[in-house]
Image (tube, helix red, strand yellow):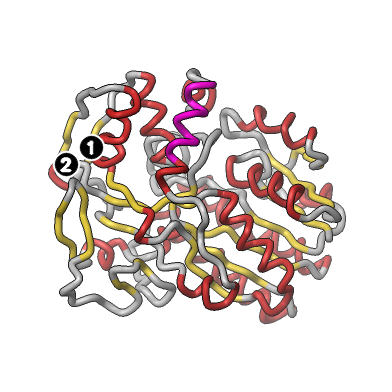
Amino acid sequence: MKIAITGICGFVGSELALEFRRRLADAHVAGIDNFSRPGSETTRPRLKAAGVVVRHGDVRCASDLDVLGDADWVVDAAAQPSVLVGVDGRTSSRQAVEHNLIGTINILEFCKSRGAGLVLISTSRVYSVAALNALPLVVGNGAFAPDRAGPWPAGASADGIAEAFSTAGPVSLYGGTKMASELLALEYGDAFGLPIVVNRCGVIAGAGQFGTVEQGIFSYWIGAWAAGRPLVYFGFDGTGHQVRDGLHPSDLADLIERQLRGGSTSSGTLNVGGGAANTMSLAQVSAWCAERFGARTVRGDGTMRRWDVPWLAMDYGGATRRFGWAPAKGLATILDEIADHHRRHPDWLSVTEPL
């Protein structure tokens, strides 16, 4: 099997590549990266040592994909992954669209020309911000939590957000480009007979992640806490009650392996995440950090930011029913792994933070 990965030197792309080398002994794994993300060069030696072929290439340039040669499957892990992309002052709206949508079109054309299947790494942020903010929630133990008395809208429950949940805008430029990519990918699959798998992922987290304030929040929070950097709870009265679930990349690789082996029968859209049982609020992560690294003060700023949501956990029941899949690594284990990485690499944030 020939597997091509775009964004192969990013956190998700590199971890998937290494997992595929371990899991699929006969697979040829190769990929491209434009190395625009600080820290991405640090993953290249690990990939080379594992027998993964890495070449420079940018998905915004169609001809750059040609260096991949033939492929049976493409795993698209190339994106500007922040919900603030295009409006954060560091990237433009045009760059957001070119990276996250035009890049997808170029990848789809590559797949069409080679008869390759596509695994599109999408996001939980395709779901409606207004609908997520209207969920029935209560506060307990320093976190928003589902009010089991409801009422719950279609596609949502105390188990999390399912695929049928509203995707009505606004969802952010990031969410909009990923939603458009999903729609185009499925249409290409139907028009040209290509297997298309869309995995809408929650927060993916683990050691070596390039965490920032806007993305990779578990990794960023632990690293910043340990390094003594200032931390702020934004929105929701400055309490830090907002909640996310955590998914380890090895669990994502496990699901994708099952999808690759399933071939054309794997096509479709699935929610993938740690689920409601693997969630923490920022306040709870702070309590965890205080026990590990010592207490400190986090400033509260109740100013609501445009696309903030209070509680977002992925209901992965569809993946369980179709592939017998469930995450194996709990969030506590993931946090331990991140903290251990920081102990061994105390300067990691400075290596990987945006310039």
User: Where residue 92 sits: x, y (%)?
Assistant: 47, 42
Q: What residue is disc 1 on?
A: 233
Nearer to the camera, 16 or 87: 16
Q: Secondary structure at mark 1?
A: strand
Q: Are marks 1 and 2 in contact (CB under 8 Å)?
A: yes
Q: Amino acid at mark 2?
A: Thr
As measured in the structure, the alpha-carbon distance from the residue carrying label 1 to the one carrying label 2 is: 6 Å
The N terminus lies in which quarter of the figure?
A: bottom right
Predominant SS along the magenta part: helix
Local crowd size for mark 2, using a 10 Å CA cut-off: few (<14), some (14–19), many (≥20)? many
Q: Is residue 162 above or below residue 145?
A: below
Judging by the rendered image, the residue that carries numbered circle 2 is 239
**Residue occupying image coordinates x 52% and y 27%:** 352
Please state which amino acid type lies under the numbered disc 1.
Answer: Tyr
Closer to the camera in the image, 153 or 18: 18
Q: Above or below — where is 119 with respect to 82?
A: below
What segment carries the magenta color? 335-344
Position of 249 with respect to 339 (left or right) is right
